[in-house]
Amino acid sequence: MQKMRVRNHQVVLNRSVGGDAGIAFFLIIMGVFMFLPMYYVIIQSLKPLDELWMFPPRFYVQHPNFKNFSDLFTLLSDSWVPFSRYIFNTVFITAMGTFGNLLFSSLAAYAISKIPFPGRKACFWVIQRSLMFTSTVTAIANFLTLSTFGLMDNLFAIIIPAWGSSMGLYLMKQFMDSSISDDVLESARLDGCSEFKTFWIIAMPMVKPAWLTLIIYSFQGLWNTGASQYIFSEQLKTLNYAISQITAGGIARAGASAAATVIMMIVPILVFVITQSNIIETMASSGMKD
Amino acid sequence: MEDRIDKNNDSVMEESENLQNSIVNEEVEAVDNTENVNTEEAEVATDDVVAEAGEPSEGNEGEAPKTEKKKAVSRKDMTMAQWTWHEMKRNKIAYLMIAPFMFVFLLFTVFPVVLSLVLSFTNFNMLEMNWDMFIGIKNYTRLFFEDDIFLLACKNTLVFAMITGPVSYILSFLVAWFINELSPRIRAIITLIFYAPSISGSVYLIWATLFSDDAYGWVNGVLLDLGMIDSAILWFHDEKYAMTLCIVVALWMSLGTAFLSFIAGLQTINKSLFEAAAVDGIKNRWQELWYITLPMMRPQLMFGAVMAITGSFGFGGVVTALCGFPSVNYSCHTIMHCLDDYGNTRWEVGYASSIAFVLFLIMIGANTLVNKMLSKVGQ
């Protein structure tokens, strides 16, 4: 008979102490590897100038201060295009793109998941396949399409393609499959609820984790929009682009660029921390079944 | 507006349906075989029809009565095409719902692939705007027989993808599996630590600082200080190290969607299965993994594989940011870079399209292959 151990008030089967120790060791090594670069960015952003160029470089700060951050804002306030314009562009792209993607994807996900119309399988097949290649493949053709529509040098050249991003739809459809029972929808329809009303009043509140996840995915993608081949005018460029220009300033800007990186990374991380449990809940149904 | 169009369609549809009916009746008498085939298929869906008979046609007022005038609708009375037509009409609201998404999706994701295929047979050039230049498969022969840099890029891409893809996949799964039994709070923290690099945008640029070419890069600094090297190593600008370092960075930021999917999937496995397995003589965690966890996780494993493969081909931008473009002696030149070079710098759209299409085929091929392999897990 095997030895039984208790962990978190549950009986744990089939676990050896040696194995646990090995796993803990592996996790710590990997965790350090994952975390150190992040830590180094934060440290760099807090280092005063003399420490930034100290030899050998240190993995800690002796006199942390926020001068790099204030330098960053001085730098940015001198820029040719007001800095608030870059922020506006990024916020505008992110908000419009995410909203459109959420609206279009959830409507389509509901129809594909819950209405047995001919062609739904084909639609979903194509959408699933579209997860299998990156946007690198479509970039050139999209350049032609967007210039045909006269959307060059327009923020909508980034926003509109984001509306048709298939990742959010895929996750939402899978989540709807597993979390909304057809009986509920059927009884709503029997009560005379139109399909749109059923979708809006019954289905949407039930898939809150999925639309939060969709928002996060869309947000992460759009927030990090950098230099785009579709945008030429300086006043239409994004925050990420402006910040990468500071980094490109070379060694003189090392401190400010670290500060900028910290600011850019903190937003998505905070958003993830807040929504983590919802995302994990959505991911539980993300599996592919074919 | 849409409604009016729909109604017009309805009347047209009805007429054509009646027409079809009469034609079909004659056909059915003439050819028994087709009928048989149809009924076989129809059997599957009969349940649907029975269920529908009870409910007062569609939920949508105003458009319903037309179907009620005819005799009760049963699938057996109809040919496949008619049945499909009937179902399409009954669910036409669904088409309205998918229309906005599908329009954008088809335009910006599916159409580009088709357009790339078409353009890849031309020597269309953005600078000359020559529209009528069909050159057959010349672009492809040029790619595979004349363009040495493309072949080198192919090799680099495959090396890059074949290392980062599987390693990041296995790493994602192992970490997810290892932290599965920890308490929820610790699990959340570890998840954050491992997941953060993949979502924090340009934070990977810190690797350029850690491995910078001068003595102020942390790695060079430490090595010089310890006396292990005499002069700074040009890490990202040295053929010997560039590729390896890029792979390390790619792995560092590759624990993304697949990782989350695994964490969530592991949580949903029914715990009683493990107890039953322990009674049945499963001796250690590895057996448990192979006989229970992996088979139960198959859907997530498939999804994770797609994410890992797609991700492993999507690192062009990171490589450019770290090694420059083009990288030293093309040591890190990938297909993505070729595409960028011909598409956005030289504007040889026809040739670039053939590269894009090859990349598309490679990615779809890799995914199909891996999905085939994964369907054998735990069997």
Image (cartoon, grey):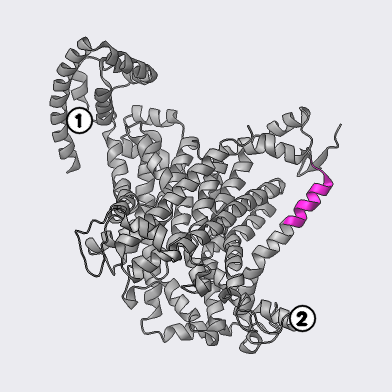
In the rendered structure, which disc, 2 or 1, sits on the residue that comes first in sequence? 1
Answer with left or right where residue B42 lies relative to residue A11. left
Q: Quadrant of residue A183?
A: top left
Q: Residues within 10 Å of mark 1 (few under 14, many from 20)?
A: few
Give me the residue at 51% from left, 55% from top.
Answer: B311
The x and y percentages for residue B95 are 28, 38
Q: Is residue B72 visible?
A: yes
Residue in the picture at 40% in, 84% down? A79
Residue B265, given in percent of the width and then of the height, sits at: 59, 42
- Labels 2 and 1 share a subunit: yes
In the image, which disc is placed on residue B62? 1
**Closest to the observer, B239 or B13:** B239
> Label 1 amino acid?
Gly
Q: Which amino acid does the dot numbered 2 rest on?
A: Leu
Which region is colored magenta? Answer: A15-26
Q: Which residue is mark 2?
A: B226
- Residue pictured at 36% horizontal, 50% vertical: A103
Is B70 displayed left or right of B318 in the figure? left
Secondary structure predominantly adopted by residues drawn in magenta:
helix
Judging from the image, mark 2 belongs to the subunit labelled: B
Horizontal relation, residue B189 to residue A75: left or right: right
Residue drawn at (37%, 16%) of the image = B43
Determine the chain carrying the residue at label 1.
B
